[in-house]
Image: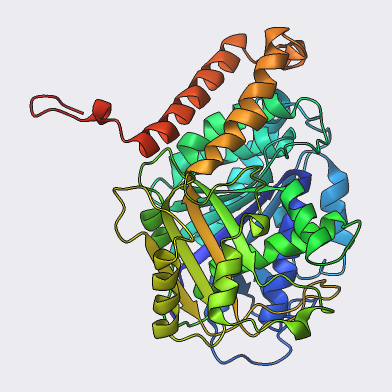
Amino acid sequence: MPTREVISISVGQAGIQLGNAVWEQYSCEHNIQNDGTLSSEGKDMYFTTFYEETSGGQFVPRQIAVDLEPTVVDDVRTGPRAQMFHPEFLLNGKEDAANNFARGHYTVGKEILDQVNDRLRKLVDNSQNVQGFIINHAVGGGTGSGLGALILERIAVDYRKKSKIGFEIYPAPNISTCIVEPYNAMLSTHWLLDHTGVSVVLDNEAIYAICQKQLDTDRPSYLELNQVIAKVISSMTASLRFDGELNVDLGEFQTNLVPFPRLHFMTTALAPVISKKKAGHEAQTVREITDHAFQPANMLVKYADFDPVEDKYMAISINYRGKIMSKEANATVQWLKQNNKISFVEWCPTGFKIGLNAVPAALVGGDLMAPANQNVTMIGNNVAVSRVFTERINKKYDMMYGQRAFVHWYVGEGMEEGEFSEAREDLGFLEKDYLDVVTEQASDEVGGDEEF
């Protein structure tokens, strides 16, 4: 069977823990046991896009986990799925990036980069035809932001034509785990603008709210947050792992969701997300779950004042899983448009991409969610995401950088102060790009005699 492989890279603590949840989800969906053997022969073997089969009949994830300190990677090495992962692809350094972008990107990260590159080359050589890379990392810490940007830059040079999809955990509006988050997020977003094809923006606060309100868990752990995100990632990649009615591959996400190369930051939502207790009282029709997926409360990014009229979409991809006919999916989309549930920018007439897949998301051990026969994931390119940059990063960054607070830690690791202002300027332009899309000023039009 011709496969088009996808290689996953998890960087830093957040990335690796998210990666663990994702592989747990995949393994449950494909009946792969903890030691990597199949518990029952499946109908199709499409999942070899994500797993590599060894001569012993074991399936090994095509993933690299990198961290600059050993503890998190050691958790994978000693965890329940330790036998499934190839030990060569679990890499760790000796000293931490210490929440410092410059350490992850310049000093400590540089040392481990060659090792990562070597393993990456090995994974690519073991594949027939790589179609893209999926990167999980956080942008507020040191390793995820610094080393993550470094690896992305390397992939951009070595595998220029391949799609790169990043799942980025951005700083939440009010909950913060580290003081220099605005600096790290600012610097790494500056790199992401050039080096990822699609970036899916996630934040912990929104997912906490989903767990608390909809899954009735007062104090969700990171594991439970990751399980929610894993469902979204699994829905995005379902069409690569199963034979579906209307398949969407990685390149298609990029083509359909990114109207301009810089505006590639996506908002996602998942439905139905309900606790097992409430599941019996909901109809869960296609229309209902699709409507849920467009509610701001279900989005995995927190928008304080999301306005369905003002916050316009540039493009939307809806991925259905379960027994859903294309006629039903198209009727639902028409209904969304007619009832003004969403608004598009004026220059985007169709706006929708639909994916259909017959296999619903599987339940994982310890899952809070009720099992559903049909679920839907919405991935939208909405202009509201610019508020993530303005309010969470730029505003806080300006306050700190005005006093040059904490800057010496970055400069001490070989970074120049000019890089801060360069990144800030770049994000300023990004803000303006998002404004231009909505107001549609004709200022950027190219005349007949002008060149690009």
Residue 422: x and y in percent read 52, 17
Q: Residue furthest left?
A: 449
User: Which of the pair 84/102 is nearer the observer?
Assistant: 102
- 28 vs 224, left or right, is left
Q: Quadrant of the C terminus?
A: top left
Percent from the top left, x then y, of residue 405? 76, 11
Q: Residue at x 43, y 72 (%)?
A: 335
Rendering quarter of residue 57 = bottom right
Q: Extreme top residue here?
A: 403
Residue 292, position as x, y percentages in the image: 61, 67
Quarter of the N terminus within the rendering: bottom left
Query: Does the image show residue 279?
Result: yes
Which image quadrant for residue 83?
bottom right
Give residue 87's quadrant in the image: bottom right
Q: How many marks?
A: 0
Where residue 14 appears, as percent x and y from the top left, is: 76, 47
Task: Depth check: give the residue in front, 56 or 259.
Answer: 259
The colour mode here is rainbow
Say whether residue 321 is visible: no
* Residue at the image point whose x is 46% and y is 35% from the top: 194
